[in-house]
Structure formats: structure tokens, C-alpha cells
Image (tube, rainbow, N blue to C red):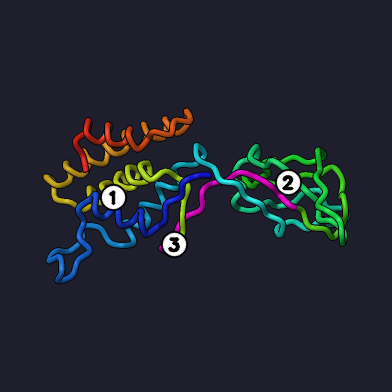
Amino acid sequence: MAITTSFSTLYTALRKELRDPQGGASEGASPRWTLDEKKTAINDAIRDAFPTIQVPYIDQTTITLSDGTFEYAVPATLQRANDLIEVWVEPDSGEGWKRQGGGWRVRENNGTLKLYIDEVWDSGKKLRLVYAGQPPALSADGDTTVVPMPFVMARAKYYLHSIAAESAARNDMEFHIQRANAWWQISELLLSRLALGQSDIAEGATQFTNWASVD
């Protein structure tokens, strides 16, 4: 079973690793990055993990077969033609879904992915699409992701230091540019380990961070 991490855990860890205060009288300082900036950076990092990290999707509401129609729009979460794995047809009462071993394909049409079928198997029935897709963005504190935490932390820091560099004074700008470049390299190294199926990226993150001496 894949290890998942909650949005609140990622956010709290990111804020602490960046030494970024929450703000208010208890901490006596204002945060360098807003709450929205930190949460957006986390979701941008999760997005960047695709296609190295994929999650399974099952959609059985988007497509309804219709007589004479052989082209159908696919769900927005299906982003690449080769990621569609299986197509099933809605059963009659008391029967099981019918898997279609062939007669279908996904192609791009004017920049949009479409499902093409050779025949209308059963007009009025829904199709169940089984496919791989991008890990979904997080919004609620309890939302979780399978994207490994070390990668999310490294990539999110890249985005946040990039934001800071755009508005910082010259001396601070150079600091944030250096940090952004370092965290980009670290996150890319971690992603390459994930692509090779290596699971020890937490150790790798520590090694790379010590090497770069960044936070």
C-alpha cells in the first residue's frame, strides 16, 4: 500500500523547514510567504510529480453510448492517450460490467483527447474507463497524496524561493535565486530516483540537502 501524507502535515512541515512563522503576537514576526502561496507551492509540486507518479482513476459517468456516435470526450483527468487501460460497458440488471478487449482507442483531435470506438456496443449505457492520471491537488487539511513528502518539500521550496526572488531587494534576491536553483536540482534528483523505482528518497533528500547546505 502506498504511503500517503496529508495536506496539513505537508503544510506544517514546509513552514517549519523554511522557519517561516505563522504570524501573530505569539511568534512576533510576519510570515515571508502567505498561506495561499505555501499551499499553492505544495500543489504545484504534486503536479510536477506526474507522470513519474501516477494514480488510478475509474470514471463511469462521463460517457454514455449513443447510436451513430463513435467519438466521445474523455474525463479531464485523462491527460495522455496511452494512459487509458481498460474500457467496460454498463451491465444490464443483474449482470456484471462487460470488459471490451478491443475496438477502442484514444487520439488527440484539435488539442483534445477523444475516445474512438468501432461500434456502439449498447446504446444508452455508460462506459467505465480505467486509467492512470495525475495525482489530484489538495484542498482540505485531511486530503492526502501519494507523492513522497521529500519531493514535495524540495519542489515546494523551489517555488517559494522563486516567488521571494521576484520581490526581494538585490542582496536577498541573490539569496533566494541560489536557494531556488539548489532546490530545483535536489527535487529533480529525487524525481529521477522515483523514476528508477528507488524508495530511499528520504535518505537521498537528507544527503542532497546537506550537500547543498540549503533550507
Q: Position of residue 119 (x, y in %)?
A: 87, 45
Residue at point 65%, 40% (across, down):
81
Which residue is at the front of the view, 131 or 164? 131
Image quadrant containing the C terminus: top left
- Part of the protein shown in magenta: 128-141
Circle 2 — which element? strand
Residue of label 2? 115
Circle 1 — which element? helix
Whichever of labels 1 and 2 marks the residue nearer the N terminus, that label is 2
Which residue is at the front of the view, 146 or 137? 146
Q: Position of residue 62 (x, y in %)?
A: 70, 58
Where 108 sits versus 60, above or below?
Answer: above
Describe residue 55's horizontal placement relative to residue 107 as left or right.
left
Q: Position of residue 159 (x, y in %)?
A: 32, 47
Q: Residue 83 falls in which quadrant of the image?
A: top right
Circle 2: residue type: Leu
Residue 121 lies in the magenta-colored region = no
Residue of label 1? 160
Whichever of labels 3 and 1 marks the residue nearer the N terminus, that label is 3
